[in-house]
Amino acid sequence: MTSETDAPTRVETPWRRLDKRMLVVTPVAGLVRLLPVAVILLVTGQRGDPMRLWIPLGIGVLVVIGGVVRWRTTQYRITGDRVELHTGWLRRQRRSVPRDRIRTVDLTAKLLHRIFGLSVVHVGAASGSPTEHAGLSLDAVSKAEADRLRRELLDRSLIASGPTEAGPTAHHPAPARPPAMELARLNWSWLRFAPLTFSAIAGVGAIGAAVFNLFGELGVNPRDISAVDDAANRLTSTPIWAAVAVLASLLLVVAVIGAMVLFAERWFGYRLTREAAADGPGWDPAGATASAGIGTGALRVRRGLLTRRSLSVSEQRLRGVEVVEPLLLRAGRGAYSKALATGLTRSAQGGALQPPCPRAEAHRVAAAALREQQHDVTLAPLRRHPRAALRRRLTRALVPAAMLVAGVFAAGSAVPVLAGLEVPSLLLLPLAALVALDRYRNLGHELTARYLVSRHGSVQRRTVALQRAGVIGWTFRQSIFQRRAGLVAVEAITAAGAGGYQVLDVAAADGVALADAAVPHLLTPFLAAPEPEEPQHDRR
């Protein structure tokens, strides 16, 4: 018979503070951000004015005090079933996330954090709404503590009812883990895809705009620089077509080089690995698993040169993958894959499993992440949609283009300056027809053993493999024109990713059958019951 003293004593888990090195990192980071403001105050202020010196010094003192107060008022703890964070002095905040709702753990270490051996831990968790996610951030803890938290929070087997007096791991140490398996790593030949991504080009433009804005704030005119002024004079003395060609070539070269530099900084040291749980299934490198489908470990993406980032996604919360092919990237036979899970940011890079790479590599990584064969997920043969979907796309593309061309012809007859645009505007009609044909060619869907696979889009083609078990509802949309054509848009609702994924313009009867077959019995209560037979009246 076991006495009461033999049972483990439950005690209150102590609160912990952030790493003391944040007392240096936070003020230094704040001062670096305020450095341009201080420079502007010093440069633009009147000579002999003491405020030029006191204002930057006052701002620096406030930043240091704010860093100390932030460290003193921030504490966290991890119990057997929750992660709790208390922050704030004037405005106190209390965050609490159940551990069984944690989906992702993102470790981010900017250059200053890396110098001091620190890392920021972002905990992503599911919320009650499929279009929102909840979580908290610990800014910052030591690198060793961050890695320990990442492993502990994603391992479902470590969730207990609560810690004991001797601590959560004193009598029950974590079992040994098998080594992580590498699924993909950076290939520098992928650098050729960097100029084909809009985000990299937009990043170069944003950096250029920031540089010009800084020149303006400092009162520096680029034309005052002799080399720039000489180049500008030469361009103005050349024919307009030559000047435009030179400027376009320079912008193209700058965009290409800048996109490659951003690609290298963002994806330096990229590795995609699978970290199995202590009791998780094994993985066959050939592509099969001991138990295909959902795993018990975590997918981990590590990347970054100046800012080092590590994203870990629990396999038990992974609901599918998405292969994205923007137009320019698709023209170069490239693509990239993304994980579909709750707790991920909704930015363009949120959940990215790899950088832009060859299309075949993107599909291989997507299948490896799901522990499936490629022909069962994103490379599954898809069913074509009805010809009515083609007519609808042609109508939606050609009618606006024809109206625009007609407007150009009308404006050309009224405004002589626009008279030369009529003939070039006619090119919009075949271009719109080609886009419509491509959009129809990319339409398709299929049901495999465990996934609903759909594809759509032309400017950005997306192939989604969504777990049928992850579908929690269906939405059917039908406009007036779709109703006349006998088409319907079917959207699978899920708690992961964008919250819903569409199968566009299928036949109305096929859409209902698709939803019913993908998740059996989910639509049964809503299907119309057979009408009762009319009662037989005795005519005698």
Image (tube, grey):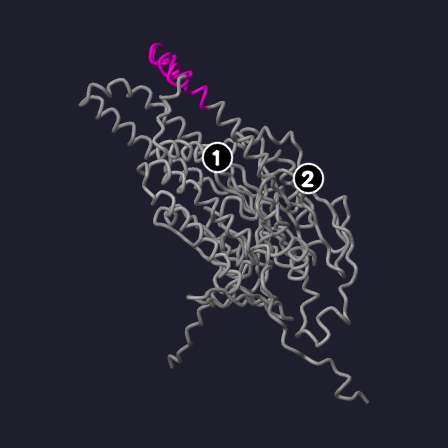
Q: Earlier in the sequence, mark 1 or mark 2?
A: 2
Relative to 248, say whether 43 is above or below: below
Dot 2 alpha-carbon crowd within 10 angstroms: few under 14, some 14 to 19, many 20 or more: some
- Which residue type does callout 2 highlight? Arg
Q: Which residues are magenta?
A: 227-251
Q: Is residue 478 magenta?
A: no
Specify the quadrant that holds the C terminus: bottom left
Relative to 170, say whether 404 is above or below: above
Q: Which residue is mark 2?
A: 185
Q: Which residue is mark 1?
A: 198
**Residue 414 shows in the view:** yes
CA gap, disc 1 to disc 2?
A: 23 Å
Q: Secondary structure at mark 2?
A: strand
Q: Outermost residue toward the right?
A: 1
Residue at the image point whose x is 46% and y is 45% from the top: 33
Which SS type dominates the magenta stretch?
A: helix
User: Which of 457/519 is in front?
Assistant: 457
Q: Secondary structure at mark 1?
A: helix
